[in-house]
Image (tube, rainbow, N blue to C red):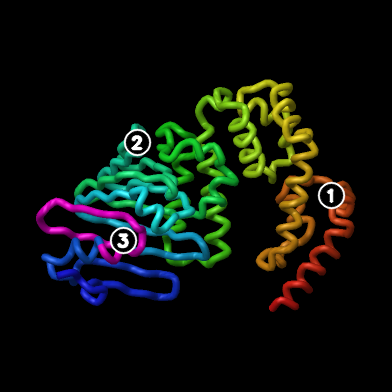
Amino acid sequence: MRASANNGDRRLSGTKTSWSTDTVDPRERFAYWREFVCQSLFNVSAEAPAGDFIAQMKVRVSGQHRFLTSGSSAYSFVRTARNIANAPADHFTILFQVRGETAISHDDDRFVLRPNEVGVFNGRQPFTASNSDGARRVVAVLPLPMVMSRVPWLRARPLYRLESNSRFLNLTRLHMVRLASDDLNETQSNLLAENLCNLISLATTDAEPNRMPAELQLDAVRAYCRGNLHNPRLSPTLVAERFCISVRTLHLRFEKLGQTFGSWLLETRLEACAKGLSDPHQHSCSISEIAYNCGFNDLSYFNKTFRDRYGMSPGHYRWMKSRQGIQRG
């Protein structure tokens, strides 16, 4: 007989939900977990060895993002092409292994995540995973477009394990733990999730970025620049050195876009400022703070280029967007 949702410890409080097998009949525990967590929540098929099974999971939902902590006995699960066809998942999963091991495979690409390691996998692709007994994990599930806008080269890598010597691995782990905590509001979650994507971008380009194909290298350069817009010293020389290429090669990459590096960077910074001026959560920030945070260090230049781009001053743009928000409300 299958377990019902009432058999388990399942608490809902706003956007926080938890599941536990503690109060489920031992004979029904894995059936409960397979149905209400594996199938309903993640749309994967699961199997476990015979014997006692225990598991707990806490999930926090914030907008389109999900963050969770979980621990369990040994079990394996698979996301098949049929699972994907029945319920496409436009997300990336970022998994921080806290204890035990998780083995993950996709076709011939496979690795084992051990304690303190981080892996990334694409929800649109089939995969197989197996957790060791007593494994504990912290997981972030982020929209695929959000991740791809910052780490577009991962489209060619359904599975990716961050290198253990990456300079950004520890910061990635700290962000994961913080995002899974209960005391963040949606704005804070969004900002930290964006930072997490930027860290994944930096970590996945840490090793030999000059060996990337030209198209992926350009994607990597743009993702790196978006993550460092706040740096007023961002320049062709700095970026070329970061990616171990010549300045001439960098300019050739941007010629394929029909832009120069400078024109692309200015346009990207202006778009980021316009987004900040439109954001009601940044109304307490002055216009100069938003400009500085996007890498402008000359307010006269910022005001002139913003007016040229949007046909009005930054102050009038903010006022207009605020009025539009009030009318929609």
State the separation of the CA atoms marked 1 and 3.
Answer: 51 Å
Q: What is the three-letter code of the residue carrying label 2?
A: Asp
Tell me what residue is drawn at x 34 percent, y 32 percent. Answer: 108
Task: Please give the label number shown on residue 107.
Answer: 2
State the separation of the CA atoms marked 1 and 2.
Answer: 50 Å
**In the visual, does 44 lie left or right of 219?**
left
Going from the N terminus, do you reach mark 1 or mark 2 first?
Answer: 2
**Is 239 within the magenta?**
no
**In the visual, does 174 lie left or right of 21?**
right
Q: Residues within 10 Å of mark 1 (few under 14, many from 20)?
A: many
Going from the N terminus, do you reach mark 1 or mark 3 first?
Answer: 3
State the separation of the CA atoms marked 3 and 2.
Answer: 22 Å
Q: What is the three-letter code of the residue carrying label 3?
A: Gln
Going from the N terminus, do you reach mark 3 or mark 2 first?
Answer: 3
Q: Residues within 10 Å of mark 3 (few under 14, many from 20)?
A: some
- Residue 292 in percent (x, y) is at 75, 50
Q: Quadrant of the N terminus?
A: bottom left
Q: Is residue 54 above or below residue 9?
A: above
The answer to whether residue 280 is seen in the rendering is yes
Residue at mark 3? 39
Q: In the structure shown, which secondary structural element does the residue marked by tag 2 occupy?
A: loop
Q: Quadrant of residue 72?
A: bottom left
Residue at mark 1? 302
The residues colored magenta run: 35-56
Of the two numbered discs 1 and 3 in the rendering, the one whose residue sits closer to the viewer = 3
